[in-house]
Each structure stands twice: as structure tokens, then as C-alpha cells.
Amino acid sequence: MKKIGTIHIGARLDDVGRTLAARLEPGRALVVSPTPVARRWASPLLAGLRRSGFDPSMALIADGERHKTLSTVEKLYGRALAARLDRRSVVIALGGGVAGDMAGFVAATYMRGVPFVQCPTTLLAMVDASIGGKTGVDLPEGKNLVGAFWQPALVCMDLRVLKTLPDRHWRTGMAEVIKYGLMADPRLWARLEKSDLPTLKKNPRFLEQVVAVSAGIKADVVARDERETTGLRATLNLGHTFAHAIETVSGYTRYTHGEAVAIGLCAAARLGARMGLFPPADIKRVDELVRRWGLPVRVNRPLSRAGILAAMGRDKKALKGGFRFVVPTGIGRAKVVGGVAANDLAGVLDEVGL
Ligand SMILES: NC(=O)c1ccc[n+]([C@@H]2O[C@H](COP(=O)([O-])OP(=O)(O)OC[C@H]3O[C@@H](n4cnc5c(N)ncnc54)[C@H](O)[C@@H]3O)[C@@H](O)[C@H]2O)c1
Ligand SMILES: [Zn+2]
């Protein structure tokens, strides 16, 4: 087990109760989990909570991003009231990023805020969504438009839960891991260049290291720029301006988030090279690593160019006065750049099939 502050990597779900009891008075708890995840993984968590003196209730939620809404949150407030949660009770998320974002928002707002615990069950939630304190829901107008910063008291990553995770979700998490290597960690990058998904799934120690290094990078960046004021936290969005545009224009169905991020990383490397910031010879290394982990380097069918540019213009990182992007400046380094020339951007979009 590795600990990075309150993030416990390789901890056990059945130990959450004991760890929590050492930090707060055991009382009522609400476990928020999508039905399919709860069916497989809730019992060790609930048993451990009970053993440590907690009184847990389950709040099952419908599965999927389309349920990450205020209407689900409202139902969860109802469940919390019915279970008689008070200000000292704890809300626990057991699931992927969707459950974590929503349960976190409930914890941040129920009775003006109650303690919160994250038990992420997807690789993406472990290396990304469960760390950093961003919680929230989608509106019909767009993703993550309502939310709050609310830090969990404990993040318990029981890596054994990943044995039921479908491969496509493994690859989505790995796209973020590849992003961390490219933006911040040449050693992580080099290890990924010598491995692949089947190897990672067979090797729990390697998996624990990959998750710990990735979670560590995210936690470190967030600690230095929690509210995105210095621009450092924005580097976590490497590849994401392209990715969000791909997801928006393709209607969130054709590509997973990780697949879109993978294409976005290939695009960001090319943009960096065109701006004279990233060694052109390393573009091939980015493409090869993305392919090695079973992820796409370009879109398989062209998307509307006008749509892509419009979506990029709406991106949170596109400030007035031209496009801003995060580009790599080497393997393991990245920075935010402004003043991207339209013809450089057009050239990059051509190269990744957009
Ligand atoms: N708060 C943040 O900083 C942050 C960062 C990144 C992403 N996010 C959010 O995270 C969400 C995406 O998270 P996600 O990719 O985890 O998606 P998800 O939560 O929808 O989970 C993906 C699917 O995997 C299933 N699943 C979860 N754990 C499983 C397991 N162990 N075995 C089998 N199936 C399992 C889920 O039921 C679901 O169907 C998005 O809403 C995104 O906005 C938030
Ligand atoms: Zn992402």
C-alpha cells in the first residue's frame, strides 16, 4: 500500500471503516454507487463500515454519464434525509468518476457540507477524477457546469476492483496515464514504452506503481494550484482541448473520453512541433506509445472542421484573443501557449484526420 496524504493506493475496501474511524466519530454513512458496481463491490465496504461502528445505507444510482444530473442529486438528498444523515455523517462514493463527482457534490452541499470519502472503481477515477476535489454535475447545456470544490477525507483505491473493469475502460484510464508521462514524467513514459495493457493487468505491483505515480502527479499539481489560478493546473488538460472538441462534435458516442484524449495528445505534440517547442522526432514516440496501449492516433472518420473549431472556441481554456493550448515541450514537460496561428492549427487538424 502507498499513501499520498489522504490517498491510499492499494488499500482495501473492507478497511475503509477502520481507517475512517481513526479520523472521525463513527456514525451514519451513505454509500452512493451505480447498481452494477454495488452488486460486485459494495459488500466488503459495508461489512467493514459496520465492524467499525458505522451505520451505512446504500443509495443506488442509475449507471452512466446521462444520469450525472441535478435530478439524481436531488434524489440523493432525499435518500440522505430518509437515512437521517446529519452534519457529522459521511457520504461515500463507490464507483467511477460519475458516481464520485455526484456523491462529492452531494457531500459538499448537503447541510452545507459533510465529510466525503472516495472509493474509485475505474482506472480513470483512480488516476484522475477522485483526486483534486472537483465535484459536480452536467446541465443539458454542457458537461460539469455546476459544481463545487470539496476535498475527500480519504480516497481508498482498492486495485482488486479493476478485475471486473472492461478493457475499453482500462484503455481510457491509460490515456490519462500517458498524458501524465508526457506532461510531467519521462520515467513513467519510458516504463510505458516497454509495456502494454495485458502485461499491466497481470502485474499488481506494476499497476500499483502506475496508479501511485499518476495519482501523485495529479495531487502535486492540484496542491500547487488548487483553484486553477497560476495556470499550472491547466497543464493537466494536455490533449483535452482537442479531446473535448472531438467528443462534442461526435456526440459523446463514437469515442470514449480516453480515446479522444489519445488523439488529442497526438495533436498537441504536432502543434508543439509546429510552434518550435516540441522536437519533431518525438512525435513518432507519442504515436507509438498511444498505439501500444490500444488507443487511436487519429479519428477514423472526418468530423466537421467548423464544428471542431467552434467547440474549441467554447473550451474553458480558450480565452479571448485567440486559442490557448497546452503543448508538450519535450517528453515529460508541457506548458500553456497562446497566440496559436490559424494555419498551424489547421495543419495539425489535417494530420489527425479532423
Ligand atoms: N472531478 C474530476 O476532477 C474529474 C476528472 C476526470 C473525469 N471526471 C468525470 O468522471 C466521469 C468519467 O468517469 P469514468 O470514466 O470512471 O466513468 P463512469 O463513472 O461512468 O464509469 C464507467 C463505467 O464503468 C462501470 N464500472 C465502474 N467500476 C467498475 C468496475 N470495477 N468493474 C466493472 N465496471 C465498472 C460503471 O458502472 C460505468 O458503466 C465523467 O463524468 C467526468 O466528467 C471528473
Ligand atoms: Zn481527461
Image (cartoon, helix red, strand yellow):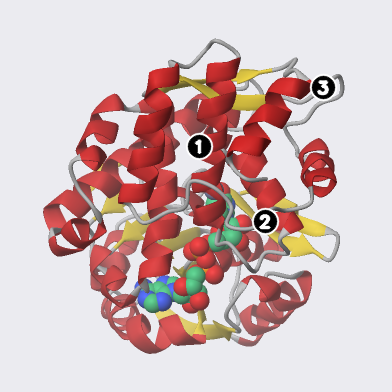
Question: Which percent across, then down, holds residue 113?
Answer: 64, 57
- For this rendering, which residue is in front, 2 or 286? 286
Read off the residue under disc 2: 247
Q: Residue furthest top?
A: 276
Q: Residues within 10 Å of mark 2 (few under 14, many from 20)?
A: many
Is label 1 in a helix, a strand or a loop? Answer: helix
Point 77% across, 76% down: residue: 71
Q: What type is the residue that disc 3 sits on? A: Gly
Query: First in sequence: mark 3 or mark 2?
Result: 2
Q: What type is the residue that disc 2 sits on? A: Glu
Cα separation, mark 3 vs mark 1, equals 21 Å
Point 42% across, 67% down: residue: 168
Q: What type is the residue that disc 1 sits on? A: Cys
- Image quarter of the C terminus: top right
Question: Which percent across, then down, holds residue 187?
Answer: 24, 28
Cα separation, mark 3 vs mark 2, equals 21 Å
Read off the residue under disc 3: 322
Determine whether label 3 and label 2 are within 8 Å by CB.
Answer: no
- Splitting the image into 4 quarters, where does residue 312 fall? top right
In the image, the residue with mark 1 has its CB under 8 Å from the nearest atom of ligand 2 = no
- For this rendering, which residue is in front, 210 or 71? 210
